[in-house]
Image: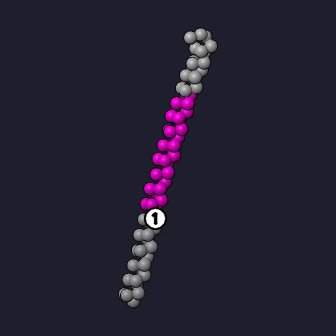
């Protein structure tokens, strides 16, 4: 192999390394976003549960007030 072929192979190898590093960074970023979205969704579900419980409690309280009067 002559010098030009070696230089070309070296350049290709460098580009390949950069692509692999970029893919790794993208994967880490996507995984971080998925984890954050999952955390936010869980928080929303918990808040919805408490809202439903408060609403049901208010209805039960209103019915009890009507019955006891």
Q: How far from the left and from the top, in percent, is residue 62?
A: 43, 81
- Residue 59, percent from left and from top: 43, 78
Q: Residue at 41% of width from left, 87% of height from top?
A: 66
Kindly indicate the quadrant of the structure image that contains residue 54: bottom left
Question: What secondary structure predominates along the stretch shown in magenta?
Answer: helix
Which residues are drawn in magenta?
18-47
Give above or below for 47 relative to 68: above
Q: How many labels does the image show?
A: 1
Q: Is residue 22 above or below residue 49?
A: above
Q: Identify residue for label 1.
A: 48
Q: Nearer the viewer, residue 12 or 50?
A: 12
- The verdict on residue 35 being magenta is yes
Does 28 appear in magenta? yes
Which residue is painted at 46% across and 64% down in the image? 48
Residue 20 image point, x, y percent: 52, 30
The residue located at (41%, 69%) in the rendering is 53
Check the picture and name the quadrant holding the N terminus: top right
Residue 22 pos. (x, y %): 55, 33
* Residue farthest toward the bottom in the current orientation of the protein: 69
39 above or below 24?
A: below
Q: Furthest-right residue in view?
A: 4
> From the viewer's perspective, is residue 3 above or below residue 36?
above
Quarter of the image where the C terminus is located: bottom left
Q: How crowded is mark 1: few (under 14 residues within 10 Å), some or many (20 or more)?
A: few
Q: How is the image coloured?
A: one colour
Say which residue appears at 43% left-offset and 76% top-offset.
Answer: 58
Single out the residue that lies furthest toward the front.
1
Q: Camera-side residue: 63 or 13? A: 13
**Which secondary structure, mark 1?**
helix
């Amino acid at each position: 192999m002559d010098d030009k072929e070696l230089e070309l192979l070296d350049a290709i190898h460098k580009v390949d390394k950069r692509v692999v590093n970029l893919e790794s960074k993208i994967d880490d970023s996507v995984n971080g976003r998925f984890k954050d979205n999952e955390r936010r969704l869980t928080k929303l579900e918990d808040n919805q549960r408490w809202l439903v419980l408060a609403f049901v409690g208010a209805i039960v309280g209103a019915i009890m007030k009507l019955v006891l009067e």
